[in-house]
Image (cartoon, grey):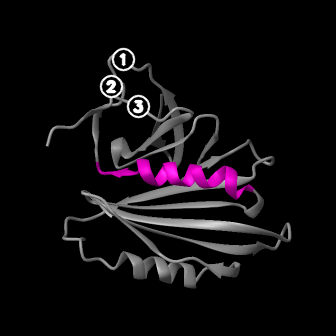
Amino acid sequence: MGKQKKHNLKWIKETLALKPNHHWQASPGYKLFVAGRGAVRFEVPQDWFFEPDTKSFRFLDRKPPNDDCRLEASFNLLPPADWRNFPLAQALADVVEHDERHILSKGEIITLDRQTANIVWTEFKFLDPQDNREAYSRICVGLGSGVQCLITFDYWVDDADRLTPVWDTVLRSLILGLYVSDPTTGAALPD
């Protein structure tokens, strides 16, 4: 398992051996991505290329420049407040409305209510100007347990059958604010 440490605005990967009785589990063919000691957690395909940035984490189906899709995630820790009534759907609609790409069609906003998080996501189709090719962009905003996350997924329309299940797995496995005390075991911090 790789653990990221921030050092002078760059992420340094540190590999730790998992203990035999660790609690980390992922679906077959997937691996767990955990950021901020558990602030954000979700599953990604096991063989995807990981590319950390200063403010986000990127996963690509192949090493650039041969990649056909990009899954990118970022998160913010929120100040203590009651965020349950924050208008997530409207915030997501505003993000899509101000997107500067040539949007061809927009999907509906879908709400996923979880016990500890509110999650909204949508999809739109756009024309990629560089390749003159149609692509999808999916955008998810999650809010819960003092964490706000943003996940985007861009891929070619031709790859939708192959990549839609990846998005479904990311959303199904998304957990916010479940912090771990020991990354080698996955044991949660006591409340």
User: Which residue type does callout 3 highlight?
Assistant: Gln
Q: Residue at x 34, y 23 (%)?
A: 22
Q: Are marks 3 and 2 in contact (CB under 8 Å)?
A: no
- Element under label 3? loop
Q: Position of residue 61 (x, y in %)?
A: 69, 45
Crowding at dot 3, Cα within 10 Å, few <14 / some 14-19 / many 20+, comes out as few
Residue range in magenta is 159-177
Q: Is residue 160 magenta?
A: yes
Using the numbered discs, state the Cα–Cα distance from disc 2 to disc 1 in whole angstroms: 6 Å
The kind of residue on which mark 1 rests is Lys
Q: Residue furthest front?
A: 161
Eyeballing the image, is 82 above or below 171? below
Say which residue label 2 marks: 185
Residue at which label 3 appears: 25
How far from the left and from the top, in percent, is residue 41?
40, 46
The label shown at residue 94 is none
The answer to which quarter of the image holds residue 167 is: bottom right
For this view, does 41 lie left or right of residue 52? left
In the rendered image, residue 1, in percent from the top left (x then y), is placed at 48, 28
On the picture, is 101 further left or further right than 90? right
Q: On the image, numbered disc 1 is attached to which residue?
A: 19
Query: Mark 2 vs mark 1: which is more N-terminal?
Result: 1
Disc 3 to disc 2, C-alpha distance: 11 Å
Q: Main secondary structure of the magenta part?
A: helix
**Mark 3 or mark 2: whose residue is earlier in sequence:** 3
For discs 3 and 2, the disc positioned in front in the rendered view: 3
Q: CA distance from mark 3 to mark 1?
A: 13 Å
Looking at the picture, how far across and down is residue 106, in whole percent? 61, 79
Q: Amino acid at mark 2?
A: Thr
Label 1 Cα neighbours within 10 Å, binned few <14 / some 14-19 / many ≥20: few
Residue 73 appears in the picture as rendered? yes
